[in-house]
Image (spheres, coloured by chain):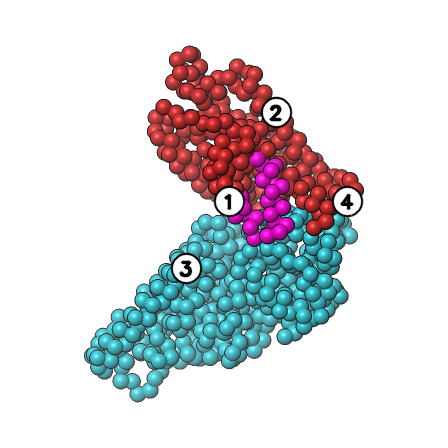
């Protein structure tokens, strides 16, 4: 392997990794606040992307307009899911909520197939144009956009959690829901907003991922597994961790693929197991103590 | 494990049944077979799943399961729900349309073909095998058609061979349908290694590219494709300089593209399904790799390939085993008319068939051809012999189907397509050859 190939592998790894990072952000956000691993996150992304697609193709809405409208839809969709499915289960054991999100995964997937069919559809990119070449290295514009969006969202949400009142309320709800309510935090509202934001992150990820995977109801199947891995790797409670985990996974996968292509996917799973054994909090996560 | 267990149980049941029939003596044991005109199969060569006691017939007449004076029963499986449903539904409609057309024109030798069941096996191996058993043992069909999907076909193969039920066109590209040949299984679409060999032959002999790279899906399809190319490359004087597997659904092909480029491959053979093909083409395009991409008929999709890959698709060569539909061709018009007569779209207009309708339709044509050639005295043995005798059978959509005593591959003719940019700047997939391109073994 020459140095040029190595460098390009890393660039391509970052490109794929930024998609993992985008998909992981929403997962981590919802988990961080509500302890729920949302298995339906990928399907929410797919559904929001189909909304954007329909607006563009049927409604003639331009790309960025469709993007914004799809995000609004996704926010409402996320809040509805919280209200209809998650909140009624708030007293149920966590496992029930996990199973409910697994159910949602299949429901959203089936409904999307029913509405939009099973054929893959081309999805446009926000930026188009010739790839940028530096020396022998190639950077495509959508890749740069994805990286920029992933980093910007990471910073925005990091700031939100750290400095805004809402973010502090979210952290309070995450730490101790009962205590948060006792001091006047409207926990239900905080959770609804969290799911709304989770929906927005999902749709953003979907819209940026769809040009790569093509738009189809199963577009997130593989991405979601990688997003989980990215989350575990970075620390499931850390938004910067999700991004770092995603990028790192993308690069590591490419390097594994260079030598033993058959092990590219098993590698992701091996990584989950290894991280859980040796560094359960992930690279940037904080140690979770057991809730009472 | 499941398959072997089933096989073992099955063998036991069979031998027990045979013993019972022998003990019961001539005509003593009434069989489970309801049709009185169904004589017992000759147990030695064709162990039927529920063999009736051997009757003291004057001469062995052969297996007439599913045949009456006025009907012949057939059935198959094809996903009607789930992700593969769009394919399965089209296959069933294409098959049904041709059979109904034949029935409405008097049937075959005075018999109407009765499609008893097209079971929704949801592209699942276990359900496919269960469907085969139901059709053979309780629906008691004469032959199986249409049969769609690699999982169900592979899971059923041993069972088909044991029961001897004629299988008309198992729809999958895996080589097990034709290699080694099975007496009662008649493949139609080319199998992966044969097709991969043709693709290699084309790039080497017609395009003069001798350094080949293969990107193959880590599945039966990909492995068999790679094997076909490797086996054939040396004979062609070519060399596989790089090959790399990937998982189904992969979206990042930068690793194999960079490596193939570094190894100086002049052509890249993509043994991939649609999504990966698109991703690989995009990677090649973005990384400025100008080797000739060539791929399986699986991706000869004139609508989706240009639509999904755009500029990156230009230059792609895709195999094919039926000529691309030319609307002026009278055969195509006939095909559209027959499907449109029996199936309507959502607006009530005659349905315009797709490639999967074609596959179902061809299964219907081959079935009917076998029934015609087998004559009025229809037996499974006669039907199998009739199909075995087929040489270059051309129907409406069925083209160039041949079998022989030790040949079950069906079609070895290829029609290649290429993605180009036409004079209006549109990216389209057009046929390369009108006359079939053949594999030189």
The answer to whether dots 1 and 2 both sit on one chain is yes
The residue that mark 3 highlights is: B128
Q: Earlier in the sequence, mark 1 or mark 4?
A: 4
Camera-side residue of A181 and B239: B239
Residue A278 drawn at (x, y percent): 49, 37
Depth check, front residue: A98 or B407: A98
Mark 3 and mark 2: span between their CA atoms? Answer: 51 Å
Task: Give the label, 1 or 2, closer to the camera.
Answer: 1
Chain under numbered label 3:
B
Q: Which chain is red?
A: A
Q: Which residue is mark 1?
A: A270
Q: Chain of mark 1?
A: A
Residue drawn 67% across and 65% down?
A: B200
Nearest-to-viewer mark from 3 and 2? 2
Mostly what secondary structure, the magenta segment?
Answer: helix
* Magenta span includes A254: yes
Residue that label 2 marks: A155
Which residue is at 47% across, 38% downward? A277
Q: Residue furthest bottom?
A: B58
Residue found at x 56% / y 78%: B391
Residue A18 in sight from this viewpoint: yes
Find the magenta span and give its range: A245-270
Which residue, given by chain and number where applicable, does mark 4 sit on?
A136
Q: Quadrant of the C terminus of chain B?
A: bottom right
Chain B, colour shown: cyan
Establish if B92 lies above or below B311. Answer: below
Residue A187 vs A246, above or below: the answer is above
């Amino acid at each position: 392997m020459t140095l040029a190939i190595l460098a390009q592998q890393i660039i391509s790894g970052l490109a794929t990794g930024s998609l993992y990072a985008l998909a992981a952000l929403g997962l981590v956000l919802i988990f961080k606040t509500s302890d729920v691993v949302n298995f339906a996150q990928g399907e929410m992304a797919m559904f929001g992307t189909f909304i954007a697609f329909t607006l563009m193709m049927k409604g003639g809405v331009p790309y960025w307009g469709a993007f914004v409208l799809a995000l609004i839809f996704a926010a409402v969709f996320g809040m509805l899911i919280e209200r209809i499915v998650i909140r009624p289960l708030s007293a149920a054991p966590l496992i029930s909520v996990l199973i409910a999100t697994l159910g949602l995964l299949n429901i959203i997937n089936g409904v999307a197939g029913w509405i939009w069919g099973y054929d893959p559809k081309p999805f446009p990119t926000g930026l188009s144009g010739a790839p940028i070449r530096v020396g022998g290295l190639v950077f495509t514009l959508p890749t740069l956009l994805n990286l920029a969006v992933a980093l910007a969202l990471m910073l925005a949400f990091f700031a939100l959690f750290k400095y805004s009142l809402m973010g502090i309320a979210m952290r309070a709800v995450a730490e101790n829901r009962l205590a948060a309510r006792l001091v006047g935090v409207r926990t239900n509202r905080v959770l609804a907003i969290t799911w709304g934001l989770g929906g927005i992150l999902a749709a953003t990820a979907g819209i940026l991922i769809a040009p790569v995977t093509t738009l189809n109801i199963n577009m997130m199947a593989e991405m979601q597994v990688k997003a989980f891995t990215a989350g575990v790797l970075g620390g499931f409670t850390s938004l910067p961790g999700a991004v770092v985990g995603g990028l790192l996974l993308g690069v590591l996968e490419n390097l594994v693929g260079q030598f033993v292509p058959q092990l590219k996917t098993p590698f992701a799973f091996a990584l989950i197991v290894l991280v859980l054994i040796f560094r359960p909090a992930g690279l940037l996560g904080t140690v979770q103590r057991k809730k009472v | 494990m499941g398959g072997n267990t089933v096989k073992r149980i099955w063998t036991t049941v069979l031998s027990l049944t045979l013993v019972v029939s022998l003990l019961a003596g001539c005509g003593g044991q009434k069989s489970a077979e309801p049709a009185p005109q169904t004589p017992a199969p000759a147990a030695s060569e064709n162990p039927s799943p529920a063999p009736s006691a051997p009757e003291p017939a004057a001469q062995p007449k052969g297996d007439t399961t599913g045949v009456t004076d006025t009907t012949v029963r057939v059935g198959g499986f094809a996903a009607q729900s789930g992700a593969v449903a769009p394919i399965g539904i089209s296959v069933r409609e294409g098959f049904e349309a041709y059979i109904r057309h034949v029935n409405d024109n008097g049937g075959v030798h005075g018999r109407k073909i009765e499609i008893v069941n097209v079971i929704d096996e949801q592209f699942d191996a276990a359900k496919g095998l269960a469907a085969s058993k139901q059709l053979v043992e309780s629906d008691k069909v004469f032959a199986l058609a249409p049969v769609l999907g690699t999982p169900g076909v592979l899971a059923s193969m041993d069972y088909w061979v044991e029961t001897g039920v004629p299988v008309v066109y198992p729809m999958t590209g895996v080589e097990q349908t034709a290699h080694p040949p099975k007496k009662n299984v008649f493949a139609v679409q080319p199998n992966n290694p044969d097709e991969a060999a043709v693709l290699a032959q084309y790039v080497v002999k017609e395009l003069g590219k001798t350094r080949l790279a293969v990107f193959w899906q880590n599945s039966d399809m990909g492995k068999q494709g790679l094997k076909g190319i490797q086996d054939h490359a040396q004979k062609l004087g070519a060399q596989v300089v790089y090959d790399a597997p990937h998982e189904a659904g992969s979206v990042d092909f930068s690793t194999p593209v960079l490596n193939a480029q570094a190894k100086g491959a002049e052509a890249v053979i993509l043994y991939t399904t649609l999504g990966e093909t698109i991703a690989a083409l995009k990677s090649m395009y973005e990384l400025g790799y100008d080797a000739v991409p060539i791929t399986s008929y699986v991706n000869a999709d004139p609508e989706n390939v240009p639509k999904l890959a755009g500029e990156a698709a230009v230059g792609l060569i895709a195999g094919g085993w039926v000529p691309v539909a030319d609307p002026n061709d009278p055969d195509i018009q006939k095909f559209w008319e027959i499907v449109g007569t029996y199936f309507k779209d959502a607006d009530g207009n005659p349905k315009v068939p797709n490639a999967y309708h074609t596959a179902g339709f061809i299964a219907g044509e081959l079935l009917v051809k076998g029934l015609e050639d087998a004559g009025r005295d229809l037996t499974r043995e006669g039907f199998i012999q009739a199909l075995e005798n087929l040489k270059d059978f051309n129907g409406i959509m069925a083209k160039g189907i041949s079998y022989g005593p030790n040949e079950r591959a069906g079609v070895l003719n290829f029609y290649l397509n290429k993605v180009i940019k036409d004079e209006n700047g549109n990216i389209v997939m057009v046929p390369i050859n009108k006359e079939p391109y053949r594999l030189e073994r």
